[in-house]
Amino acid sequence: MTHYNAKLNWLKSFQASSKFGNMTFKCLDVNYPLFEKKDEFFTKVDLATFNKIEEDRIPFFIGSQFGIHPNINKLEGFFNGRKHVALLAKSLLSGLVHGLIIYEQLEGEEVFMSRKIAEFM
């Protein structure tokens, strides 16, 4: 029997994507707000690795009513070229997960730009 978990629908949808499905996520080695995940898709890394632009891993953040965790605009060296950014939209009060949004950051940007290119519910 397969256990159904609505809080992971975004991950199933992401995995089914022809563009992103073979990618995984890298998390900065800090305390993130709690969220349900499958560990095999997440790797904790140091800041230098988190900032590195990679073809097969996307930097992972959680966006909530209290802001983005970790604070993307305060990460030294993060804005170093064109890259994708994964943001899990989640309420920290109710625990409701809206979905995963992939944003694109462009060369020369120095702050987070809300340029959505994909959404997984």
Image: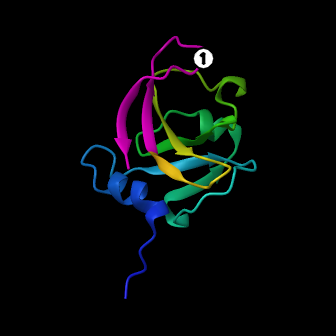
Question: Please, is residue 121 above or below residue 102 in the view?
Answer: below
**Who is closer to the viewer here, 47 or 86?**
86
27 falls in the magenta region? no
Q: Position of residue 11 (x, y in %)?
A: 42, 57
Answer with left or right where residue 24 lies relative to residue 22.
right
110 falls in the magenta region? yes
Q: Position of residue 106 (x, y in %)?
A: 45, 18
Residue found at x 40% / y 28%: 116
Question: Please, is residue 52 above or below residue 106 in the view?
Answer: below
**Who is closer to the viewer here, 25 or 116?**
116
Task: Report the residue marked by disc 1.
Answer: 111
Q: Position of residue 2 (x, y in %)?
A: 38, 82
Instruction: Identify the residue at the far right of this view.
Output: 31
User: Mark 1: which amino acid?
Assistant: Val
Instruction: Identify the residue at the far left of this view.
Output: 18
User: Looking at the figure, which quarter contains the N terminus?
Assistant: bottom left
Residue found at x 65% / y 29%: 72
Answer with left or right where residue 14 lies relative to residue 28.
left
Q: Position of residue 8 (x, y in %)?
A: 46, 62
Name the image colouring: rainbow
Q: Secondary structure at mark 1?
A: loop
Question: Please, is residue 14 above or below residue 12 in the view?
Answer: above
Residue found at x 44% / y 30%: 103
The answer to whether residue 77 of the structure is visible from this angle is yes
Residue found at x 64% / y 37%: 65
Instruction: Identify the residue at the far bottom of this view.
Output: 1
Highlighted magenta segment, given as a residue range: 100-121
Q: How many marks?
A: 1
Count residues near mark 1 (Cα–Cα under 10 Å), then give few for <14, some for 14-19, many for 20+.
few
The answer to whether residue 76 of the structure is visible from this angle is no
